Amino acid sequence: MYTIGQVSEMFDIPVSTLRYYDKEGLFPSMERKNGIRRFGEAEVEALHVIECLKASGLEIRDIKQFMQWCSEGPATYGVRRELFERRREAVLEEMARLRRTLAMLEFKCWYYDTAIADGGEERIASLMPDRLPAKVQGLYDYAHGLESREAEPTPA
């Protein structure tokens, strides 16, 4: 069993947030001893799932619904699975967006490193948009949506 302070440190979550989660019913079977919350392995595992769902963009009211489904037992396996599939797809979409963002950032770092080294942008301009060095061309193309995900370059 863990105290709220220990769980706060383990997850780097404020104690106030843990109290809020408890108030919202996200730890329905949490034990209390003399009014003090005691987090068991079930609450710790629930917190891992809660943090995952939050990080995936799910709101507390929807996480609360998920926890309700969990308490309803096996009859809700299907809807729980659907929830995780939707969150998985949302995370994959966000990752694709972030990879494009990273490609643009990497391209622009190369661009300005080169401009600084050259003392200007003239040479770069002569290479744009399709005669850049191969790795940089991949970054440029990916950032501009000109290549598929399979052709995604590795950042520099």
Image (cartoon, rainbow, N blue to C red):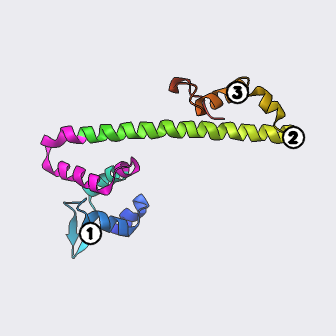
Residue 35 position in % (x across, y down):
22, 75
From what the image shows, is residue 99 above or below residue 11?
above
**Mark 2 or mark 1: whose residue is earlier in sequence:** 1
Q: Give the range drawn in magenta.
A: 52-80
Q: Is 145 included in the stretch rendered in magenta? A: no
Relative horizontal placement of residue 127, taking residue 32 as reference (left or right) = right
State the residue in front, 32 or 57.
57
**Mark 3 or mark 2: whose residue is earlier in sequence:** 2
Residue type at tag 2? Gly
Residue 86 position in % (x across, y down):
32, 39
Whether residue 7 appears in this view of the structure is yes
Q: Which is more foreground, mark 2 or mark 1?
A: 2
Residue type at tag 1? Arg
Relative horizontal placement of residue 155, taking residue 13 as reference (left or right) = right
Provide the residue designation for mark 2: 119
Q: Which is more foreground, mark 3 or mark 1?
A: 3
From what the image shows, is residue 145 above or below residue 108?
above
Provide the residue designation for mark 3: 129
**Mark 3 or mark 1: whose residue is earlier in sequence:** 1
Quarter of the image with the N terminus in it: bottom left
Q: Do the CB atoms of the residues marked 3 and 2 lie less than 8 Å apart?
A: no
Residue 55 position in % (x across, y down):
40, 50
Q: Do the CB atoms of the residues marked 2 and 1 lie less than 8 Å apart?
A: no
The image's mark for residue 37 is 1
Query: Which residue lies at the image location 12% right of the left edge and 41% below the top edge?
Result: 75
